[in-house]
């Protein structure tokens, strides 16, 4: 384990934050069964970071940066990317990178360096980065602020184990943040809006053409964009939502399986049962039996 964490020496203003986990506590976290999977090495908040820049040719830890406002840039082996408010950067261990604030509109950012035995597993659901344009997410800002409270606590292991769990929650929450993208037409495709349409049609049928038409896109462009945002086909997610609702109906009521199928727009109860088994892992009758006795 390296004694130092490779952070910038950017001069902190009064409302800036930079906090390094002491080496003794890093060693304890790396050995703790409760924290060793993923734990913070350093964290901070840089407001309007004029002149901030870093080049890390051989980073020994992972780095998460969330740009709250302003602008900056990221440089990797694949080239240079512009960064603006609402962008998230995930820079993995061992991969060369550089970044810095825009001269005219310097960024305001949260950041955390981290490591651990299970970091790769925590990052896997996020897919390929290194930049995600997720927008300014109030919940994510609150999670960074909660993590930064670590600097106000005593230097005992319990506080740092708790901070490790907060970091793990933050990372896992990224996989379920509402995803959106701006299309070439200038319109925004928002996964939350798409799934709201899906929920409005849980009791009937909805095919890909009808769903794409709701957002004035071709079937192909809609399906490709949705999959790029979520990793799933849109109809796959629609079926998942239907089966989740089927579970609620089976949990809450005395309706028969045929009636549940009909409520979800399936005339063929056998087809419904096959879908339910595929998604839930058991037949509807077996699922209902879990709540009996």
Image: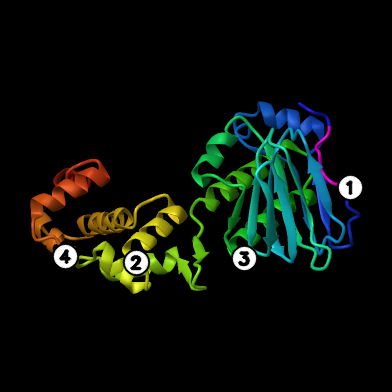
What's the distance in space between the residues labelled 1 and 4, CA to CA?
61 Å
Q: Is residue 254 visible?
A: no
Q: What main secondary structure does the magenta stretch of the protein show?
A: loop
Q: Are marks 3 and 1 in contact (CB under 8 Å)?
A: no
Badge 3: residue crowd in 10 Å (few <14, some 14–19, many ≥20):
some
**Element type where label 1 sits in the image:** loop
Q: Are marks 2 and 1 in contact (CB under 8 Å)?
A: no
Residue 131, image x and y in percent? 62, 52
Residue 87: mark in rendering: none
Range of the magenta residues?
A: 4-9
State left or right for residue 279 relative to residue 106: left
Compared with 65, 212 (above or below) is: below
Residue plotted at (62% across, 65% down): 136
Which residue corresponds to mark 3? 136
Residue 218: mark in rendering: 2
What's the distance in space between the residues labelled 3 and 4, CA to CA?
38 Å
What's the distance in space between the residues labelled 2 and 3, CA to CA?
29 Å
Q: Which of pointers 2 and 1 lies earlier in the amino acid sequence?
A: 1
**Element type where label 3 sits in the image:** loop
Which residue corresponds to mark 1? 9
Q: Is residue 242 magenta?
A: no
Q: Which of pointers 2 and 3 lies earlier in the amino acid sequence?
A: 3
Which residue corresponds to mark 4? 263
Q: Are marks 1 and 4 in contact (CB under 8 Å)?
A: no
State left or right for residue 254 relative to residue 186: left
State left or right for residue 15 relative to residue 146: right
């Amino acid at each position: 384990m390296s004694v130092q964490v490779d952070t910038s020496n950017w001069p902190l203003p009064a409302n800036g934050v930079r906090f390094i986990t002491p080496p003794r506590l890093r060693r304890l976290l790396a050995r703790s069964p409760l924290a060793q999977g993923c734990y913070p090495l350093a964290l901070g908040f840089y407001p309007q970071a004029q002149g901030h820049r870093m080049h890390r040719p051989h980073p020994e830890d992972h780095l998460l940066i969330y740009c709250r406002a302003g602008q900056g840039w990221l440089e990797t082996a694949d080239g240079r990317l512009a960064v603006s408010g609402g962008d998230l950067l995930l820079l993995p261990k061992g991969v060369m990178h550089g970044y810095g604030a825009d001269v005219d509109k310097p960024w305001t950012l949260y950041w955390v360096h981290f490591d651990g035995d299970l970091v790769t597993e925590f990052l896997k659901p996020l897919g390929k980065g290194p930049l995600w344009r997720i927008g300014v997410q109030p919940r994510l800002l609150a999670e960074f602020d909660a993590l930064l409270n670590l600097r106000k606590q005593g230097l005992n292991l319990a506080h740092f184990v708790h901070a490790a769990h907060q970091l793990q929650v933050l990372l896992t929450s990224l996989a379920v943040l509402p995803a959106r993208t701006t299309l070439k037409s200038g319109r925004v495709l928002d996964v939350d809006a798409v799934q709201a349409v899906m929920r409005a049609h849980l009791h009937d049928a909805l095919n890909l053409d009808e769903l794409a038409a709701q957002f004035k896109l071709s079937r192909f462009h809609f399906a490709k964009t949705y999959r790029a945002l979520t990793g799933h086909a849109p109809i796959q997610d629609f079926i998942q939502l239907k089966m989740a609702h089927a579970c609620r109906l089976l949990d809450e009521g005395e309706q028969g399986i045929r009636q549940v199928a009909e409520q979800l727009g399936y005339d063929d109860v056998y087809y419904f049962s096959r879908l339910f088994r595929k998604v839930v892992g058991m037949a509807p009758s077996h699922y209902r039996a879990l709540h009996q006795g």
